Image: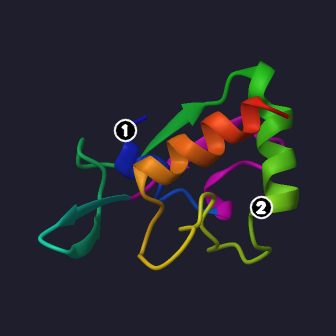
Amino acid sequence: MRWGGVIELRRKDIAPEASVTSVRLAVTHREGKCNIDTPKSGKPRTVIVPPHIREDIKAHHAVRTAEDAGALLFPPAENGCHLNDNVFREYYVVTLQDH
């Protein structure tokens, strides 16, 4: 999955059993503006989630994703329309490896 599709994922895009995700939209940031549109391929697609990470996704939903169906899977840490890739790398990758 491309970064723009990942940061636009919402609770409703992940199947309840976390077996598949629907990439419906993607986001780009250009000239200080947030643009949400179809993915780069031009059409939505379904991605199979590998079995070994499904429990992690469900746990993430339980702790870090708001209950609303439209809630972002990875909400921005501070101001902004979507999560910044540096914040993702620093928090979700580095911090969670320590736990």
Residue farthest to the left? 31
- Residue sitting nearer the eye, 98 or 24: 98
- Residue 4 lies, in percent from the top left, at 36, 51
Which numbered disc, 2 or 1, marks the residue closer to the eye?
2
Q: Is residue 82 above or below residue 60?
A: below
Front residue (pair 83, 99): 99
Residue at 85% across, 59% down: 63
Badge 1 amino acid = Arg
Whole-Å distance between the Cαs marked 2 and 1? 21 Å
**Location of mark 1 (residue):** 2
In this figure, what is the number of numbered marks? 2
Which residue is denoted by mark 2 in the rendering?
64
Q: Read off the magenta span.
A: 11-25
- Classify mark 1: helix, strand or loop: loop
Q: Position of residue 93 (x, y in %)?
A: 62, 36
Badge 2 amino acid: Arg
Vertical order, 74 against 41 (above or below): below
Name the residue at 41% across, 76% down: 80
Tell me if mark 2 has few (under 14), some (14-19) or many (20+) residues whose alpha carbon lies within 10 angstroms of its own.
few
